[in-house]
Amino acid sequence: MDDRSATPAGPSGDTGEAPAEPSAEVLAELDRLDAASRAAVGEIAPQIALWRAVAALDHWVFIDRGDGEHPRPYALAAEPGTMLCVFSTADRATAAAIGAGLVTGGEPVRMFAIPLPAALDFVLSFAAAGAVGVTIDHPQIGAWSPLQNIAMLRQERRGEDG
């Protein structure tokens, strides 16, 4: 996968104060669901469980590749097309940015967070710019979902949120 810049749609969440990170238990569950999904190649149910857990997070973190006034999420070029990179925590986003060579160790990583379910609408807005999916915690997890499935998760989440 190659670094891609996605056209910004503008985050719809507060980018000022850093949101609370998910608990260690929530992160362990994401990792467990990822392992279950990898162990059951070709089975849909484990993938759905993983992405439902990702969509149940309080917020998604994005590495900012834009400028201060126009945030733009970090994205990768993959065989299916452009994948937006979403992260469960700032630590995982920082590790990814350093690993991808976007910053050097010790250099701050610009990022922004958007609460769910608004983050679902945010990533869906990039379909017009050619994005075809999202990947979670790449490369640590790296599972990806097409935007059509994100739209279904948005409908499920909206049903829960009222």
Image (tube, grey):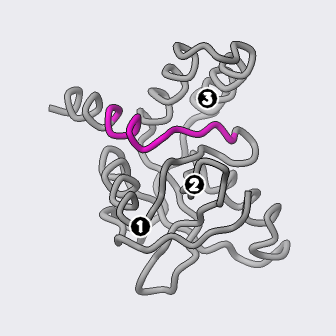
Q: Which of pointers 3 and 2 lies earlier in the amino acid sequence?
A: 3
Name the residue nearer the viewer: 81 or 36.
Answer: 81
- The residue singled out by tag 3 in the image is 30
- Among the 4 quarters of the image, the one containing residue 17: bottom left
Marks 2 and 3: in contact by CB < 8 Å?
A: no
Residue at image coords 41%, 34%: 149
What amino acid is found at the position of numbered circle 1 in the picture? Ala
Q: Which residue lies furthest to the left in this view?
A: 162
Q: Quadrant of the N terminus?
A: bottom right
Span of residues in magenta: 142-153
Residue 149 part of the magenta-drawn span: yes
Q: Which mark is residue 81?
A: 2
Residue that mark 1 sits on:
129
Judge the density around disc 2: few (<14), some (14-19), many (≥20) Cα neighbours within 10 Å.
some
User: Residue sitting at 44 percent across and 74 percent down?
Assistant: 7
Q: Please, is residue 148 above or below residue 7 in the view? A: above
Callout 1 crowding tier (Cα within 10 Å): few <14, some 14–19, many ≥20: few
